[in-house]
Amino acid sequence: MTDKHAGDHAILREDLYGTTPEPTYAGTLSFMRRKYTRDLNGVDVVVTGVPLDTATTNRPGARLGPRAIRAASSIMAWERPYGMQFDPFDKLAVVDYGDCFFDFGRPQQVPDAIEKHAYDIISQGPGLLSLGGDHFVAYPLLKAHAKKFGAPLSLIHFDAHSDTWADEDDRIDHGTMFFHAVKQGLVDPASSVQVGLRTTNPDTLGFNVLDAPWVHGNGIDAVVDRVRSIVGDRPAYLTFDIDCLDPSYAPGTGTPVCGGLTTHQALSVLRALAGVNVIGMDVVEVAPAYDVGEITALAAASLAMEMLYLYACRPTD
């Protein structure tokens, strides 16, 4: 039996459950030191990276986001996150599947490759937590989840931007994918909510919008109450663009917008959504080249852990 204190848990871990300490500065990296494997037998949640940033409209670099989030997560991996009622890893067998691979020289094939990658995982039973990559990756991820869970899904969307600008069908753009998702019936905007918006797009496509001024003016509890009332018990896909956070908390992103949420607000809202029927989730748009002291990557890793907590708290049949 492998000594649980020997390190390199990403490779040597035998038990998929529990949290074991490892030096934060050493060892093979995976998300939260979970086992690096593609064997999904007995697995509850898969973490995977989607290193795409060819759909960006401003600064590139989000293709390096999955690597940065994994590295930042090592700072947190030695104990249960503060304030959680239980360790998600005591209830969930979580593995790091590695990244989705695609031919960057054939960009029009990338969406299908991402959708297939995701569906091949979730069709075997596990939930999926994806690390972007630019926000376009949420579109093929949504398609995969709608294929399994049925369309339309509810969408819980944290962002500085609506990502619902009108567009042509064959374009790959991180600002238009939810326009396509609504038009194709993947998402029901009436039971979906966008939180933290602070860029102008007059056509909401029917989404419920809790923009950043509303969040700041009404507070965390009001946000949680509104999200719960809008989504209800419907299956919901949760997507978090890191630029939902103010640039002072998340400078390492491609399209920062001032006036955003604090890390405290975002983490608190996610924590309080425990019990919502989350069926898939992602954290996207971390661009480490613009980060300062890894605070953006750390915020993303922290948000991803909150998502695992939500998944562990979801209603079960």
Image (cartoon, rainbow, N blue to C red):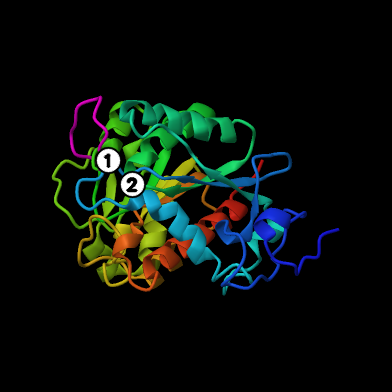
Number of numbered markers: 2
Queried whether the magenta region covers residue 169, the answer comes back as yes
- Taking the image as shown, residue 78 lies to the left or right of residue 140, namely right
| Above or below, comparing residue 31 to residue 136 in the picture | below
- Please tell me which residue lies in front, 96 or 271: 96
Kindly identify the residue that appears in the image at 28 percent across and 31 percent down.
180
Range drawn in magenta: 164-174
Q: Secondary structure at mark 1?
A: loop
- Does the residue at mark 1 contact the one at mark 2 (Cβ under 8 Å)? yes
User: Is any part of residue 36 visible from this angle?
Assistant: yes
**Three-letter residue code for mark 2:** Asp
Which mark identifies residue 243? none
Marker disc for residue 55 = 1
Label 1 environment density (alpha carbons within 10 Å; few <14, some 14–19, many ≥20): many
Residue 134 marker: 2
Quarter of the image with the C terminus is: top right
Number of other residues with Cα within 10 Å of mark 2, as a class: few under 14, some 14 to 19, many 20 or more? many
